[in-house]
Image (cartoon, rainbow, N blue to C red):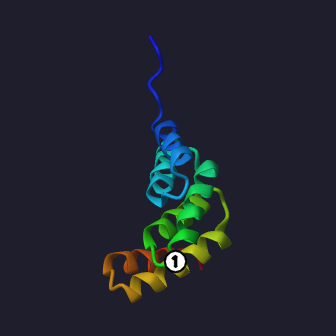
Amino acid sequence: MTAPIKRSATFASLVARQPENELFHFSLAQALMAENSPAEAVAPFLYCVQKKADWMMPRILLGKTYLQLGQRENARIQFADALRLAIDQSHEDPERELRALLADLG
């Protein structure tokens, strides 16, 4: 019996074929997080953040990834940037979540 193909492998293949597609990078990062590989998820999340300055969700997830890795200051930076976007884009639920995350970071 062969092992099932990891979702991250599927998205890594898509990224390799279309490296400019930020949605494939985002899906790869999410798959890596689901597979408990936060260190590997940082690069594809960073790609998304750098590619689309107004895309809030990758910033939130990158911040959470940094928290898992014990990188509190990097998490704080991403959460603060995401909070500005949440406010600018009138996303109330993410705004509340981000305020709570930032408060927890002190």
Which image quarter holds the C terminus? bottom right
Q: Relative to residue 93, is residue 79 drawn left or right?
A: right
Rendered location of residue 83, percent (x, y): 47, 82
Q: In this rendered view, identify the residue nearer to me: 105 or 60.
A: 60
Horizontal side, residue 44 vs residue 58: left or right: right
Asked whether the viewer can see residue 76, the reply is yes
Residue at the top extreme of this rendering: 1
Coordinates of residue 101 in the picture (x, y in percent): 49, 73
Report the amino acid beneath label 1: Ala
Question: Which residue position holds label 1?
Answer: 53
- In screen coordinates, is 89 left or right of 19? left
- The image shows residue 12 at horizontal and vertical percentages of 53, 43
Which residue is nearer to you in this view: 32 or 53? 53
Residue 103 seen by the camera: no
Q: Which residue appears at 33% of the width and 86% of the height?
A: 90
In terms of image quadrants, where is residue 97? Answer: bottom left
